[in-house]
Image (spheres, rainbow, N blue to C red):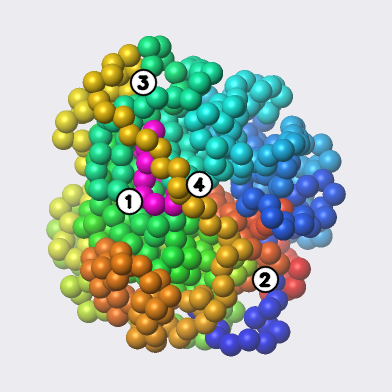
Amino acid sequence: MAAEGGGKEMNEIKTQFTTREGVYKLLTHSEYSRPNRVPFNSQGSNPVKVSFVNVNDQSGNGDRICFNVGRELYFYIYKGVRKTLYRTHMPEPAEQAADLSKPIDKRIYKGTQPTCHDFNPLTATAESVSLLVGFSAGQVQLIDPIKKETSKLFNEERLIDKSRVTCVRWVPGSESLFLVAHSSGSMYLYNVENTCGTTAPHYQLLKQGENYAVHTCKSKSARNPLLRWTVGEGALNEFAFSPDGKFLACASQDGFLRVFGFDAAELHGKMKSYFGGLLCVCWSPDGRYIVAGGEDDLVTVWSFLDCRVIARGHGHKSWVSVVAFDHCTTSVEDGDPPAEFSGSDEDFHEQIHFGAGRDRANSSHSRLSKRNSTDSRPVSVTYRFGSVGQDTQLCLWDLTEDILFPHLPLSRTRTHTNVMNNVSNSSTSGNPPNSLPNTLPRSNSLPHSSNPGNSIIDSAFIATSVSKFATLSLHDSRKERHEKDHKRNHSMGHISSKSSDKLNQLSSSRTAKADAAKTLGTMLCPRMEEVPLLEPLVCKKIAHERLTVLIFLEDCLVTACQEGFVCTWARPGKVVSDRPLEDTVM
């Protein structure tokens, strides 16, 4: 955990940090930004976002990166750790990163700004990629940055929704369907093959539940949108599909996380933030846990199976803008009690350097397979996730067995962490009572819909010319809230993590809404003392401006800040260098 207090060291921007598995190091030659490398004046601009895709070309470097800065959108070949290898006795990287002055594609927009984007991995080739781009004025563009073509523009006349696009995603497993969320609180399902029409769409009610409704577009011919979801109150800030694509988690400005069965449009469960809106959400690789972050400066862990909050994490001093699970990192223990660790990150790095955890890393898969045997010693798996926020800090967290299985005595002991790939693909059975539940194959990791015939997507296609449902008007009175409204004295970071009474007073006094008073202390929103409070393994300041991106890749993690700098952090052991590994100021 980061040290408490101020001082010069706390204000230094780190170029590396140490975890249980070793040292993560910033690769300065893999930094992406606007060609002039000048910090972007981010006042009033939409957050910088980053998207990746692999085009599987024969050169061995098929990774492509897209990012937006202000009115500009860039598309480059991504040369991260693999293409910027530091070799022993060489002062410079063996191969330089991409020439920023020569992007594959660059676009500058007038009158609107890109806000989010997403590649379709199913259709990506070395000759063509499908990239969706959402905009601040509500439109969605389908472009091919390799062919430098603009295929289609959706909601061009803003007849469907006039508010800012907050999130856009291809529907998993589909080459043509995509989902778009807006700050109006609505989501729309589109088909790239359909047009949007020249008049405002008319809707008919398809399904309705607690604080949400789903409508289909009433039309004699197929047109967009296929479906309209209205979810909660206020902006729908982000959504995320489960790993198998069957469920949809939505983070809203009203502070609620809502999880739906996507095909059936049924509410599976929900939870409420401690206070303020939820800004970000992500799934664990096996689909068993969801992490959300937002204006309460906390990360909240929610169990999909139990439909309840199982932990909160306190490390940020301002709003949490992104949360993400690290699918490549986990820890494996055989039931022997782990040793307590105390001291500095550098001291622990020396232990790692002398091979303290390498044997475990080499036998991770075999140890997981022991869950199929009659060995009575429990095997535990720890989930790693990360978060970045407006406080310019990166936090890494471990979700351990004492949180996953609360009937065991709580332990503050930290486990040794090892890098392991594709843990979620391990198939197990016959777990001992205290071990992690079975990790199912990707296609079976979540319960199937009890009635597959109730797919709302199928209904949307069928009901385009049917008008037997009542219509429901759009909510025109939804209010948008901007990031600049955040007040530092409302921040969790200014309160001791032990002062749960003060936190409860803060919530009740400054969120004077009836629904907040009703939910606090319930399963929707437990009080601070009612659930475990996680502390970050790592909490480092890594930028001058607020952080807006955190993506875990196989050999690195990628961050970006509002100044427009996209940074690559090599995982431990992925960079070979004789240069000293010390924290330095950028």
In this figure, which residue is indicated by the disc labeled 3?
218
In this figure, which residue is indicated by the disc labeled 1?
258
Image position, residue 11 (x, y; %): 68, 78
Quarter location, residue 267: top left
Identify the residue shown where x is 21% and y is 57%.
306
Name the mark nearer the viewer: 2 or 1.
1
Q: Quick one: label 4, few (<14), some, or many (20+) residues within 10 Å? A: many
The C terminus, quarter of image: bottom right
In this figure, which residue is indicated by the disc labeled 4?
183
The local secondary structure at tag 1 comes to strand
In this figure, which residue is indicated by the disc labeled 2?
14
The local secondary structure at tag 2 comes to loop
Identify the residue shown where x is 61% and y is 63%.
484
Image position, residue 184 (x, y; %): 47, 44
Q: Identity of the amino acid at label 1?
A: Arg
| Among numbered discs 1 and 3, the one appearing first in the sequence | 3
Relative depth, front residue between 81 and 182: 182
Magenta run includes residue 586: no
Left or right, residue 529 beside residue 360: left
What is the spatial separation of the Cα atoms under label 1 and label 3, in whole angstroms?
26 Å
| Among numbered discs 4 and 1, the one appearing first in the sequence | 4
The local secondary structure at tag 3 comes to strand
What is the spatial separation of the Cα atoms under label 4 and label 1, in whole angstroms?
16 Å
Quarter location, residue 399: bottom left
Q: Quick one: label 3, few (<14), some, or many (20+) residues within 10 Å? A: many
Q: Which residues are magenta?
A: 228-245
What is the spatial separation of the Cα atoms under label 2 and label 1, in whole angstroms?
36 Å
Identify the residue shown where x is 57% and y is 75%.
488
What is the spatial separation of the Cα atoms under label 4 and label 2, in whole angstroms?
34 Å
